[in-house]
Amino acid sequence: MKKWESQFKLGDVLTAEQLDFFREHGIILFRNFLSPEQVHLYISEVSRIEQMWLDEKREKVNGIPLKFGKDDEGKMTIQRLCFTSLYSDPLHQLIQHPKLQSLLPFLGAFEGRIGEEEKDGLVVNNYINTPNSTFTQMGWHTDAPRDLFMGQRIMPMLNVGIHLDTCAFENGGLRVIPGTQRQNMLKLLFGKKYFIDNSDDRREVGFDIQAGDLSVHDGRLWHRVKQSPLFGEASRRRVMYVPLVTGKYAPKDENSKTPFYHRFTAKVHH
Ligand SMILES: O=C(O)CCC(=O)C(=O)O
Ligand SMILES: [Fe+2]
């Protein structure tokens, strides 16, 4: 396990160095994408949406199940929200920001777009290490085979992470195995046991992530979320993900079916 440094800043266009780095490793971290004020605003927007959905007793958004947990006082919380930008002007504007469009060349020759209404839209993961939490870590996986479960072939896609909490390397969080985005299909599908393997890997790397940082990883890259050694609020980690997608436009709506893999991941994401 190794900590990587990063000094990359996201400008209006990606530099040759940034493109080369991403092509080699399948992951890149940009510092200070959001100001502290923006982080604060998006956290409050997520709380507002969470409360609205709890009040509505909502269980799914566009066919994708919300993931519920309880806080220390036994109050219901939502630990994974999806399609959030469709319920918030500030989040919608963030997703439409030209700086996010500037990430599309990471897809290489493929023409991409921001998947605001596709896949799970703008996801918010809210991890906390408490006895009642249902979301403390996420086992090894790649994001690519979800397409297979949807009955489609795997298309190139990137996941953009917008980090709302500071998470030092020592405190767990995102871990990736650099370069695995270039593996063959057999390794992509069977390189590790999807979601149930939480063990350390000597090849894995992570970062000291600051609230406001932005990460991009290739959908074919092996990655996981390592559990925090801390407990309670000190372990809280909120991160938003939006997919950059290619291929046929496939928006979801209220009538969209629940993908089969959610029945599986609901059981193993603890
Ligand atoms: O929370 C993270 O940083 C990663 C989440 C993830 O890999 C996923 O939702 O597929
Ligand atoms: Fe993932």
Image (spheres, grey):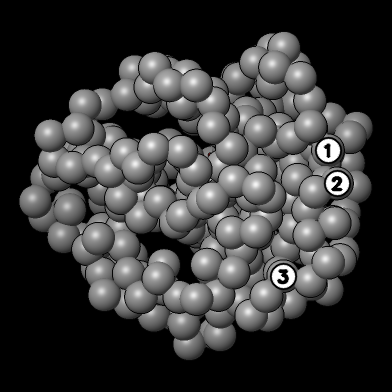
Category of crowding for the residue at label 3, using alpha-carbon neighbours closer than 10 angstroms: few (below 14), some (14–19), many (at least 20): some
Whether the residues at callouts 1 and 2 have beta carbons within 8 Å, the answer is yes
Q: Is residue 65 left or right of residue 159?
A: left
Some atom of ligand 2 lies within 8 Å of the CB belonging to the residue at label 2: no
Q: Could you classify mark 1 by the number of other residues whose Cα lies within 10 Å: few (under 14), some (14-19), or many (20 or more)?
A: some
How far apart are the alpha carbons under marks 2 and 3? 15 Å
Residue at image location 84% in from the left, 56% down from the top? 21
State the residue position of label 2. Answer: 24
Residue 139 placement: quadrant: top right
Residue at coordinates 73% horizontally, 62% vertically from top-left?
29
Q: Element type at marker 2?
A: helix
Please, what secondary structure does the residue beneath circle 1 have?
loop
In the rendered view of the protein, which quadrant contains the N terminus? Answer: top right
The residue type indicated by label 1 comes to: Gly
Q: Considering the numbered disc 3 on the image, is that residue within a helix, a strand or a loop?
A: loop
**Percent from the top left, x then y, of residue 50?**
26, 58
Sort mark 2 into few (<14), some (14-19) or many (20+) by Cα contacts within 10 Å.
few
Image height of 247 relative to 55, above or below: above
**Mark 3, residue position:** 14
Pointers 3 and 1 in contact (C-beta within 8 Å): no
Q: Residue at x 52, y 67 (%)?
A: 101
Q: Whole-Å distance between the Cαs marked 1 and 2?
A: 6 Å
Mark 1, residue position: 179
In this view, 125 is above or below 145: below
Mark 3 or mark 1: name the one nearer the start of the chain. Answer: 3
Residue 128 position in % (x across, y down): 50, 50
Q: Residue flagged by tag 3: what amino acid is it?
A: Leu
Q: Disc 3 to disc 1, how far (Cα)? A: 20 Å
